[in-house]
Image (tube, helix red, strand yellow):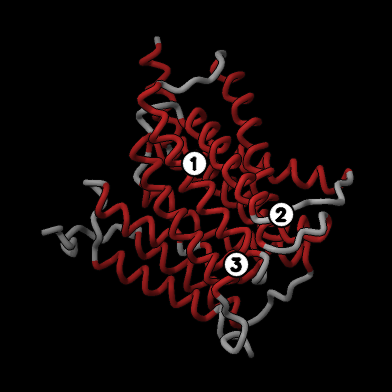
Amino acid sequence: MESSTSLSKERFFQSPLAVCLLALLCCALWGSAFPCIKIGYQWLHIEGPGSQILFGGYRFFLAGIFTFLLGSLLERRVLRMKRSSIPFVLGQGLLQTTIQYVCFYIGVANTTGAKGSVINTSSTFFAIFIAHFLLKNEKITLQKIIGCVIGFAGIIVINLEPGAWAGGVAFLGEGMVLLSSIAYGASSVTLKLISHRESPVTITAFQFLFGGAVMILIGLLCGGQITGFTLPSVLLLLYLAFLSTVAFSIWAMLLKYNPVSKITIFSFSIPVFGVAFSALLLGEQIFTLHNLIALLLVSAGIIVVNLRIGRKNTLQSR
C-alpha cells in the first residue's frame, strides 16, 4: 500500500500539467515577495543591514513553524529527522535560507523590485552549471551555454536604463541579489542531492527553522531592531512566511521527482510576476523597452536551455 501511494505521488509530481501549474504557483508567490519586502521595510521602519536580516529571520523562522505544523498534520505524525540527516539538513538551511536571504534582503533594499526580480532569475543558470558537476545525468551542453549567454544578456539590458551604470549598480544592491542567486542555484542542486534522506516537507521545515534562527542571531548581533508592528505589518509578515512555506515545500517536492533543469526552467516567470507585482504595489514604471527586451531575453535563454534538439552537442566531462 505504501509503495503504491509513493508511486502515485511520483507520477503526479512528474505529470507535465502538475509540474507546470505547481511550478508557476511557486514562481508567482516568489515574484510577489519582492514588492512585499519593500513595503515591509517601510511599514516596520526597517533601515540598515542588521534590521533587514532580522526581518528576514523572523519571516523564515515563522515559515519553519508553519511548515512543521503543516507537515505534522499532513503526515499524521510529529516531524522528526534521522540523526544521520541532521548535518545535511542544517547545511541546507545555512545555504538555502541564511546565506541566500542575508544577501537577498540587503540587495532588495538597494535596488528596484523590477530589476531585482530579473537579476534573481540568474539562479537558473547557476543551478544548471552546478548540476553539471554534482549530478551525473545533467551535463552542460552547448545548447545550455547559449541559453545562459542569452539570459545573462537580459540581466545586462535591464541595467542599461539612463544612469543605471553610473550609480545604479552597486555591490549592496544588484551585487547582493546576484550572490543570493548563486546561493539559490547551488541550494536547488543540494536539495536534490539530499531529497532521499527525508521527506521534502521535513527538510523544508527544519532548514527554515535553523536558517531563520541563524538570521535572527546575525541581525541582532548587527544591531538590528524592528518597531512599528501594526495589524497590516503583522499580516504582511505572516503572508511572507506563508508564501515561503507553500512555495518551498512544493518546489522541494518537484525537485525530488524531476531533473533540476526541468523545474528551474519555470523560474523565468519570477521576473514576470515580480515586475507585475512591483507595478501593482509599488507604482514602478515597467512599460519600457529595456524591461521588455530584458524579460524576453531571460525567458528565451531559459527556454533555449531546455529545448530538445538532440544530444550531439553534449560537452562530456573529462
From the viewer's perspective, is the residue at label 1 or at label 3 nearer?
1
Question: Where 201 sits versus 130, above or below?
Answer: above
Which of these two is toward me, 173 or 294? 173
- Tag 1: amino acid: Gly
Of the 4 image quadrants, the one containing the C terminus is bottom left
Residue of label 3: 116
Residue of label 2: 224
Q: Mark 1 near mark 2, Cβ–Cβ under 8 Å?
A: no
Instruction: Decide which of tag 1 and tag 2 comes sooner along the chain.
Output: 1
Quick one: label 2, few (<14), some, or many (20+) residues within 10 Å? many
Task: Indicate left or right for 133 with 209 as reference.
Answer: left
Q: Secondary structure at mark 3?
A: helix
Q: Secondary structure at mark 1?
A: helix
CA–CA distance in space, label 1 to label 2: 21 Å
Tell me where residue 238 sits by quadrant.
top right
- Seen at 78% across and 62% down, the residue is 281
- Tag 2: amino acid: Gly
Q: Which numbered tag is attached to residue 93?
A: 1
